[in-house]
Amino acid sequence: MMLHELVIYARREGLKVQPGFEPETIRWLLVFSPEAKFLGVQDLAGEERKSKGREFAVCPAAPSNWLLAGGRANFLVESLQTVVCYCKSEDDLPKASVKHAFFVDLLDQASSSVPELAPVAAALNDPAVLETIRTRLVENKAKPTHKATLAIIQPDGTLSIFVQRDDWHGWWLQFFHGLDTRGEDPGPRPAKGGPSMMRCFLSGELVHAQRTHNKIKGLADVGGQPTGDVLAGFDKDAFASFGLKQGANAAMSQQSAKVYSTALNHLIRHRSHRLAGTKIAYWYSGHVPEQLDALADVLGGIDLPEADETSEDASPSVAREKAQAMSRARAALDAIRTGKRPDLAAYRYYALTLSANAGRVVVRDWMEGSFEELVTAVNAWFDDLAIVHRQGQHVVANHKFAAVLAAPLRDLKDASAPLTACLWRSAVKRQPIPHEVMAQTLARVRIDLIQGDSPRHARLGLLKAFCNRNERTPNMKTSLDEFETHPAYLCGRIMAILGQIQYRALGDVGAGVIQRYYAAASATPALVLGRLIRTAQIAHLPKIESPGLRQWFQNQLTEVWSKLSQPPPSALTLEEQTLFAMGYYHQSAHRSEAKDAEAAPEEAAGQQSNS
């Protein structure tokens, strides 16, 4: 099913799927005059720091296995090391010189169809010209591995880049297919060890099954090879069935193999996001404008490991603006339900999680479904993660996926592929948060509090999402729920009040009741809370100078304790400890809100005394 959707994607995007051509990202342009005088180099990356260059949709692509034979080069597009012998060390020069000579020879041969290539080839054979080019490249801090191509300035002053022209296509195809007639490999070859004709997995036609398939590129940063990795490969006996050899186990024609590989390469380049050792690529069955792209909400800012923290102290107005700007999923759902975009209801989404290992593409996950189900799930994801700001000023609702992924971990670099996959499915498929993830997140929250740090909003948001998607725990609200009577939640609220009482009485004492007793109180509240309340009544409340504030805290403590229908539990399960953490955080944020309201506790205490 996945391969068929890739074929449909290639057709809809109008991708060039003819063997012998591939898109290529090129960094450097070597510019010549019509008389082949070298004019300069042009950095196609422009001013974008992260840009790798400019992509050209139709470039000549020699077979990788043919190039690996040694001493050979691609036509028109090659590394700077090959094009101008721009080497990192002198040890690389002999090998580069051989490939350079081959590259220039191809230009000479192609000049029969493109006469302008002849003087350029002659210039690249001139040692003085090569030295000048290398000097310019050093000045521009180019790397030998950067891709380069050629261009000339036309008599009318326009820049003509050869790979953008099509006058060389005929010569190149003749050369490409001629490799086979000369006994050289032009690409994937018919498989041996199987019937002469087999049904193609993609087209259903009788075809000569290709021995090998085109490689998938762009996975080098997630375990893959720089030269590419295979999606369908059978180079070991253990991978084969029924005595078939290599590609005969997944019969495809050369054209079919080219189509699916081109589509997947295009997705990796243009619609994928790297995350924790994997790449997530997604697309839709029809055109979805950027402002309605629901998955862009989830994956936005994915390269920022602490994206949640960079803006969480922003003003409430800024937070509201960010939330509105990121509500693509909600806008898409509204467009469907109000009839503004009824066509979106018929759309489908496709999501693919990839990595690579030992030269093979690893498909870690494949999801598909209706677009309406997707936007509903994404809306639920953000609703479940939404949590009141720690100062109680506003709601933090725009958690980046990277921040959520980092929530159970010490650092985002520790994220594993299984963790990424389960949280990704929770976001896209509305699946529950796994207990293992909850336990890890709870441990990180506990460590934060013991160390005197404020837990990240994404951590509390993830705990809230766990509660709301777990049948055995009550749904948690975004902020304090005065009507929630679960003992664990109430015990957490009491713990927060005790910490506030100590702080108002003694100030910052370093290791206070939270740092010392939170871990024990969250696991065995019956053994800890009673003793802490007595300490607060004897040692802390009397030291609060303001009588009104002292009475206000006493009333708060009494009010929450009275909601316990029985004594505090002797022990709490991990699920109940999550409720304890939510109660503690909600009460702390609620108290901060009161504190921010210009001495609201004193005013409230005065009103209670008068009543």
Image: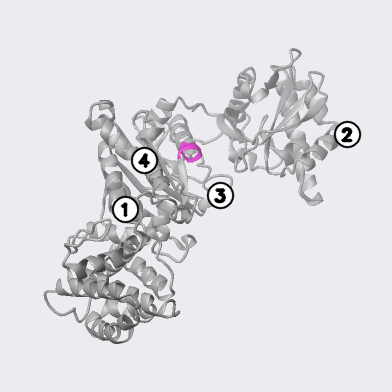
Q: Which stretch is magenta?
A: 267-271
Residue receiving disc 3: 225
Secondary structure under tag 4 reads: helix
User: Which is the main secondary structure of the residues drawn in magenta?
Assistant: helix
Q: How is the image coloured?
A: one colour
Q: CA distance from mark 1 to mark 2?
A: 65 Å
Inspect the image, locate mark 3, and give the three-letter code of the amino acid beneath it: Gln
Residue 324's label in the rendered image is: 4
The residue beneath circle 2 is: 128
Please provide percent x and percent y for residue 13.
44, 27
Q: Earlier in the sequence, mark 1 or mark 3?
A: 3
From this view, report whether residue 33 is shown above or below residue 299.
above
Where is residue 253 drawn, in percent x and y?
Answer: 43, 32
Considering only order in the chain, which callout, 4 or 2, is on the residue closer to the N terminus?
Answer: 2
Left or right? Give the position of 454 relative to 153: left
Mark 3, Cα crowd under 10 Å, few <14 / some 14-19 / many 20+, is many
> In front: 225, or 561?
561
Answer whether residue 245 is magenta in the image. no
Q: Quadrant of residue 61?
A: top right
Q: Position of residue 563 (x, y in %)?
A: 15, 71
The kind of residue on which mark 4 rests is: Gln
Residue 469 appearing in the image: no
Q: CA distance from mark 4 to mark 1?
A: 14 Å
The tag earlier along the polypeptide, 4 or 3, is 3
Q: Quadrant of residue 480?
A: bottom left
Question: For the residue labelled by badge 3, is the local secondary structure a helix, a strand or a loop?
Answer: loop
